[in-house]
Amino acid sequence: MTYRVCFVCTGNICRSPMAEHVFRARVAEAGLAGAVEVDSAGTGGWHEGDGADPRTVAVLDDHGYTSEHTARQFRASWFPTLDLVIALDEGHVRELRRLAPTPAQAAKIRLLRSYDPRAGAGLDVPDPYYGGREGFEDCLEMVEAASEGLLAAVRAALDDEPAERMEERSA
């Protein structure tokens, strides 16, 4: 059975595609590429069909990650097929919880930086869109720091009984 993770930011051109590509690399490095599917989306549809922001692409490429991407909007109908919905900031958490059809599906929503024990109290990944390259580099650093903890959580979930995961998805 495939474990499915979807990263969500505002327009799906900066933070969530960056998180998607970084986490996909971590999953592959861990030998879990066949067991874990990684995707991303935005809470809004302003950029649907567009590629990632050129600054996102440049930072990913410069750090050795893949960067091919097509933006899309998150749909409430996806909740049953996802195991984790990873929000990049509290605003996304609120929007996603409003979209979640059931409390069990809303429970799948987590903040990315909650997986980084060094993150402290501020768990938002700031939106780099209105700034320069430095903001995109900072975003990458935060994403990379949280990815190890997220990978550990996914690995632990994969060790759980498949029947429990099937039950959670359908709830």
Image (cartoon, helix red, strand yellow):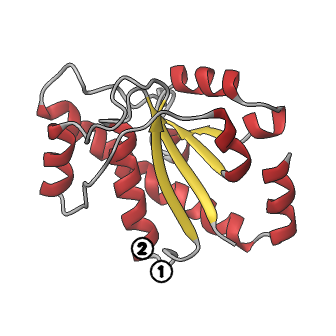
Residue, disc 2: 28
Residue at figure coordinates x 46%, y 76% from the top left: 30
The disc placed on residue 31 is: 1
Q: Secondary structure at mark 1?
A: loop
Above/below status of 129 relative to 61: above
Above/below status of 2 relative to 110: below
Distance Cα–Cα, label 1 vs label 2: 5 Å
- State the image quarter where residue 4 is shown: bottom right
- Marks 1/2 in contact by CB < 8 Å: the verdict is yes
Q: Residues within 10 Å of mark 1 (few under 14, many from 20)?
A: few
Residue at figure coordinates x 58%, y 73% from the top left: 35
Residue 82 placement (x, y as % from top left): 66, 51
Above/below status of 17 relative to 106: below
Q: Is residue 69 left or right of residue 77?
A: left
Q: Is residue 62 left or right of residue 4?
A: left
Residue 89 placement (x, y as % from top left): 48, 27
Q: How many marks?
A: 2
Amino acid type at circle 2 is Ala
Residue at figure coordinates x 40%, y 52% from the top left: 20
Residue at figure coordinates x 15%, y 38% from the top left: 55
Question: Which quadrant would the N terminus be assigned to in this image?
Answer: bottom right
The disc placed on residue 122 is: none
Residue 162 placement (x, y as % from top left): 80, 70
- State the image quarter where residue 161 is shown: bottom right
Q: Is residue 138 left or right of residue 36?
A: left
Question: Which quadrant would the C terminus be assigned to in this image?
Answer: top right
Residue 149 placement (x, y as % from top left): 52, 56
